[in-house]
Amino acid sequence: MVEKEYQIIAKNYDLAGRASSDIKRTLKSINLCRSLMKRVCSASYEAEINVVIHSVGGYAIFYMDDEIIRLEFHDDGPGILDIEQAMQEGYSTATEIDHMNGFGAGMGLSNIKKSADVMNITSTYEGTDLILTFYRTGECRED
Amino acid sequence: MKLSDIIKKYDCKVYTPTLIKDKEVKYGFCSDLMSDALIILNSVKDPRILEESILITGLSTNQSIRTAEMLDVDVVILVRGKMPSLKVVDLAIESNVLLLSTEETMFNLSGKLYKDGIKGITYNEQW
């Protein structure tokens, strides 16, 4: 079992992706099969960027055991007003600076949903909690 | 096409010379939007495709390096003569990503590479 926690700083594009890089290196070190590793890393990176772009800051927790990999992203607000709307491809409240950094086209949450096996998201003005679960059984056996 | 031939033909500046290697490039993907790179390259199931791929982008920030790292793509070509900052070069070295730059525009470089036989990656590309 592995559990790690990472701080995510709002609007800091230099450090954005640092947690996901570390998660990738952890997964690589245990030789996780590539297809699952890429799903986990892409979702993690998009979710981390979301916290950087949209929140006032937060943290991520990476958890892994023999059965599952779980990624949690928690931030301190201001929250997503309408999650259904935010899930629509192309809907975005990102700014020019976010676009200049290659993100903010409204693909984040829908991409995350495609990558994860289970996605749970709750949001109030006090913050957003995103929990992603990936099953280690199945696709990795085929590799 | 050999990576060294691409570097020579398109007069690429090599920002991470220690990472230069003799490898074959067969596939390419270009975007300034990293979400698109993530979802499309992530749909490729065969790792051999990404091993022989390059990411072409006008985005000269850390995020293009991070995106390449997440996808196991180890060559990034910046177009339009974009110059990365030192911290981007450092991150490229740390992430083992060969960082190149050319004066060509994204459309022109992609078109010329396509003519050279480099295939574009589409959603769920198969080997």
Image (cartoon, rainbow, N blue to C red):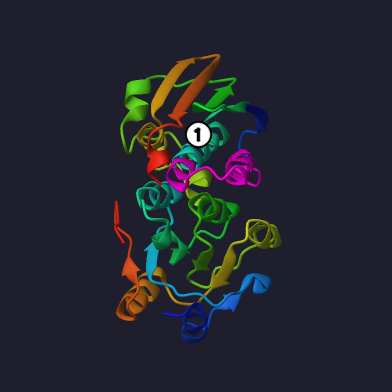
In the rendered view, would you say B6 is above or below B124? below
Residue B101 lies in the magenta-colored region:
no
Residue at image coords 55%, 14% = A126
Judging from the image, what secondary structure is the residue with disc 1 in?
helix
Amino acid carrying label 1: it is Ala
The percent coordinates of residue B26 (x first, y second) are 38, 71
Residue B69: x and y in percent read 55, 53
The residue depicted at 48 percent of the width and 71 percent of the height is: B80
The front one of A29 and B33 is A29
The boundaries of the magenta stretch are A12-38
Q: Nearer the viewer, residue B12 or B80?
A: B12
The chain that hosts pointer 1 is A
Name the residue beneath numbered marker 1: A47
**Residue at horizontal 57 percent and vertical 22 percent from the top:** A74
Dot 1 surroundings within 10 Å: few (below 14), some, or many (20 or more)? many
| A28 in the magenta segment | yes
- Residue B93, placed above or below residue A103: below
Going 70% across and 60% down the picture, which residue do you hit? B90
**x and y percentages locating residue B63 in the rendered image:** 55, 51
Q: Is residue B84 visible?
A: yes
- Nearer-the-camera pick, B18 or A63: A63
Name the image quarter holding the N terminus of chain A: top right
Q: Is the magenta stretch mostly helix, strand or loop?
A: helix
Left or right, B70 with reference to A1: left
